[in-house]
Amino acid sequence: MLLTLTTTLEPATDLGFLLHKHPDRVQRFDQAYGAAHVFYPEADRTRCTAALLLDVDPVRLVRTRGRNSPDFSLGQYVNDRPYAASSLLASAMAGVFRTAMRGRCDARPELAASPIPLEITLPALPARGGPAQVERFFAPLGWRVAATPVPLDPAFPAWGDSRYVTLTLTGEQRLSDALNQLYVLLPVLDDAKHYWMAPDEVDKLIRAGEGWLASHPDRAAITRRYLANRRALVRTALGRLADSDDSPEDALDRHDIEEEAPATDPAAAGPEAGSDGAMSTAEPEVAAATPLAERRIQAVVEELRRADARRVIDLGAGSGKLVARLLQDAFFTEVTGADVSYRAVEAAARRLRRRLQPHRDAERAAGVFQASLTYADDRFHGYDAAVLMEVVEHVDPPRLGAVEHVVFGDARPRVVIVTTPNVEHNVRYEGLAPGAMRHSDHRFEWTRAEFREWADRVAAEHGYQVRHVPVGDDDPEVGPPTQMGVFTR
């Protein structure tokens, strides 16, 4: 089976840097079921094409036979797996292009972080649902889709089309995004996998779908197909996608690279070959650690209790993680969330409905509503404390003054808690390109000095005192990953 990636961005041969594969070399990568070859049919300044050719050994493939494989004896050896793009090709991509899929390129970090013109071709792609389904899955991602049905036999047109299409995708995408989309959607369109589904498949889906799957209009169908309709896995995955949907705080709740810099590399994007040649979906074990997102919530709750703030509003609540946590604590008598995103408000409302218990929480006030932090709103008034957790960095700098006025000048709660990334700590995150921010939606990220300067000015202008609290491990050289300001009126 064959996959080609072409770019016309000059110099086009920089594609070799992004893929970490030199255009002048033909490289072979052994797989549990055959061998993957990477080569460049064309490579010059104006146009460069990288090809991934997967040569499948049907006998070796039998050892990795999945539940959806044909169960008749010859079907194990005579099938379309050596020729049609499927989970086999996705697994090969995960091994051969692993670094590229993470968006890491030390030689060209600015290129890895930028969209480039791409043309992707798959001569034979099994597609349950035909060309319309291919269009439905790829078009919302910004691709121009050409999916041509492959006839059963060109000599007999009356026989109709096969279940395969020849697919060409054209558009401008970050290479890492394009590879991760293919990694997820190839087995989704085939609607089959060649290996046993394990619970860690949810982590792989969330990781590969970061930045595009949560907002995809067909995310539920994609999730069900990817996880082979395993109900427990599908429920878990859809819940995690809902939590990460369109919310500033949740946008940072990413795996490994953003929250914690792991000592080992657990982020392999696909199944690996075990010592016996069989496929394994297990990933390397790493020491359990409390994610930074959880430590951030714990720090905020601790400061709220310390300030005896029982009535709290979470401004920029996202999908309601903090609101739900506060509702678990009887100390807090009124908890409200607000967010500019309607979809985030819907997700938060669902979370609150799951958390609230009608009898036990009858005397507690809780709710969530849609509102913008750049406009004064009477609904922000009357709380002991307001929390802006991983919110300010999503505000365009020219509009930050409006947020300051709304929160500190108009709403004026007794306590305001603000958390934001410490950009100095970014060097500790493996795979984050130099100069890159932690999330594509960030408008800025402050150093510790810049955050102190902003916080001190806001406090002085609005009659507050501010105390600075590190969140996460306080690195002696670059400081903590998250910085928090606790403002008291």
Image (cartoon, grey):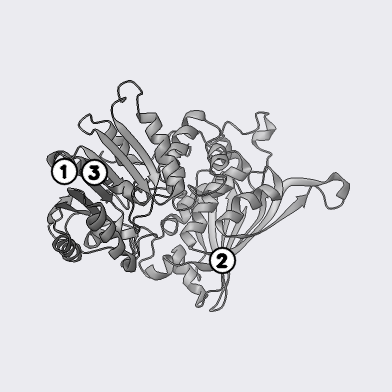
Please report whichever mark, 3 or 1, sits nearer to the chain's N-terminal start: 1
Q: Is residue 273 shown to the viewer in this render?
A: no
> Is 483 situated left or right of 185 in this image?
left
Nearer the observer, disc 3 or disc 2? Answer: 3
**Where in the figure is residue 385, as x and y percent of width and height?**
21, 45
Please report whichever mark, 1 or 2, sits nearer to the chain's N-terminal start: 2
**Where in the figure is residue 411, as x and y percent of width and height?**
25, 52
The residue that disc 2 covers is 118
Question: Type of residue at label 3?
Answer: Tyr
The residue that disc 1 covers is 303
Residue at 50% x, 70% y: name it: 23
Quadrant housing residue 363: top left
User: Which one is nearer the viewer's eye here, 230 or 293?
Assistant: 293
The residue that disc 3 covers is 383
10 Å neighbourhood of mark 3: few (<14), some, or many (≥20)? many
Residue at 62% x, 34% y: name it: 69
Q: Is residue 123 above or below residue 357?
A: below
